[in-house]
Amino acid sequence: MSTRRVLTTLACALTAVLATAGPALPVPRTARPAAPAVGTTVRTHDGPVRGVAHDGYRTFDGIPYAAPPVGPLRWTPPRPAKPWTETRDATRPASACPQPAGEVPGGSTDEDCLYLNVTTPATDPRHPRPVIVWLHGGGFTTGAGSSYDAHRMATRGDAVVVTVNYRLGALGFLAHAGLPGSGTFGLADQQAALRWVRAGIGAFGGDPHNVTLAGESAGGYSVCAQLASPAAAGLFDRAIIQSGPCPGRPDRPFAPSATSLSTARETGARFAAEAGCSAARDVLACLRGTKVSRLLAVQDTDQQPAYDTPLLPLDPGAALAAGRFRHIPVLIGGNHDEGNGWAAGIIQAGNPVTPETWPDVVAAFFPDPAHTRAIVHAYPVTSSNGGPVFGAVIGDANFACPTLRTGDLLTGQVPLWRYEFADEHAPPLTPGTPPFPLGAPHAAELPYLFDLGGRPRTMTEAQHRLADTMIDYWTGFARTGDPNRISGISGTGGVSGTGAPRWPRRTVQSLAPDRIGPTRTAAARHHCGFWNTLP
């Protein structure tokens, strides 16, 4: 099994997981009224918008936060949106940013995509509400803000939630000599959205001085990057990082949160050649004239922002280690079985994991023979279904241990809260029967916080209680920097006001139905001593 084949299969498996977020194009949250209800028109700093009133909350979708990055603005830093005077229809999401088919049915080729969506409680707040700005995952190649229906978080947590589109793939992260903003256009979009929130969220009842930046997977990596970006200083006040650890290593396929500018330029040169522009007199003019569908066809399956750049001077992990990042409260964690979804997808694609094939499978990810031997010894496969072992290697190497390492780097520098989502019977994210039980794989926590694609997952009563507790924790943290200080629609307020188990500092809080509490064995369970010493 070649490394390239494995990585391509791994990327396809990731897309399959994220595809269950549902259409990023208009998704009815509830039946839309025949005419806009009273209180659904809001005047923003750019112009008035008309949203939709639901039972207990309002939504305002497809609000532009930057000018369309089309034509000569392709591969330029985001420009301000053009103001408007007539009331703008904000009753349905705008297009997702260009991406291959997957989470977005049929994909997207529409570059006019720099929009955000606001979900806010229907009642006038007694005080401005905390704001959560959500950055979607998808490997920096897929995803859309509109896939995340945030009404439960908004109503239960009494918060304003903003979900954001940002440029993806080569359109978001191309690096080329002489191109200002190389490798960081998608990150610059996120900062433009944060500037819009600072300027305009007050019109929706949000507190522009209490903004939490949150994200999962590539969204979590993005939060790491924004913590380390000098250009993001003053744009947000707290950070939530889900399954997107900051320290990365280039020898672990999905661990790097960023890549060096020199490496990104090498990738950009190959991309230009594949697009048929490397011999052009003006390579960038050729690329700007190339159809989006062609660009999507030749871009790499994995993308990362570039450091050694003005927006991101240091790799985020190095920035944390050096203390050169924004010192604000952080909530960080991951899932107990992060790698199982990928392992299952690769096995189902025709790559069995058995005692005989296991060394070759490991070698595809870790070509150094010494690494291969060490991993096979530390993670032996003894049956014909080695999927759980394969999943553990992917999850431990790329997520669990880097996440714990990120927490260790942050400890003592900022107020820190750490978790591990551990519902071993989490609702499945993909249809069909996997080749082995997936437990709590990558993205499994998302349905506890959002209705993905506007569709709630089927849960037991205990899982519903866990979802409520997680929303209480997340919004309590957004409100005060302490997940124990919960005050939402219950009106109880105070420490653990809704009866949620107390979340101690300096430990990892395990989140499972009716089993919420600190765990002190995460590092040992995920073989972090092994991974941290592997050369």
Image (cartoon, grey):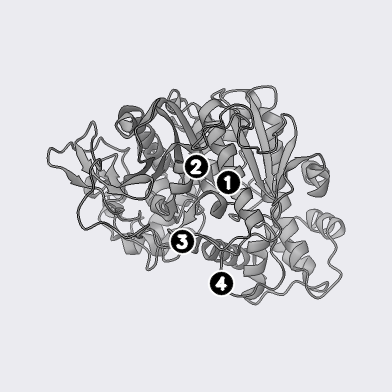
Disc 1 from disc 4: Cα separation: 25 Å
Of the image marks 3 and 1, the number of the one nearer the N terminus: 3
Among the 4 quarters of the image, the one containing residue 477: top right
Disc 4 crowd rating (10 Å Cα; few below 14, some 14-19, many 20+) is: few
Of the image marks 2 and 1, the number of the one nearer the N terminus: 2
Q: Are marks 3 and 2 in contact (CB under 8 Å)?
A: no
Identified by mark 3, the residue type is: Arg
Of the image marks 4 and 3, the number of the one nearer the N terminus: 4
| Disc 3: which residue | 455
Identified by mark 2, the residue type is: Arg
Judge from the rendering whether residue 77 lies leftward or rightward of residue 345; answer left or right. Answer: left
The one of 72 and 28 positioned closer to us in this rendering: 28
Q: Are marks 1 and 4 in contact (CB under 8 Å)?
A: no
Q: Are marks 2 and 1 in contact (CB under 8 Å)?
A: yes
The one of 295 and 117 positioned closer to us in this rendering: 117
Mark 3 or mark 2, which is nearer to you? 2
Element at label 2: helix
Disc 4 from disc 2: Cα separation: 29 Å
**Which quadrant is the N terminus positioned in?**
bottom right
Mark identifier at residue 365: none
Element at label 1: helix
Mark 1 or mark 4, which is nearer to you? 1
Disc 1 crowd rating (10 Å Cα; few below 14, some 14-19, many 20+) is: many
The one of 511 and 340 positioned closer to us in this rendering: 511
| Disc 4: which residue | 431
Of the image marks 4 and 2, the number of the one nearer the N terminus: 2
> Residue drawn at (61%, 43%), measured in percent from left and top?
469
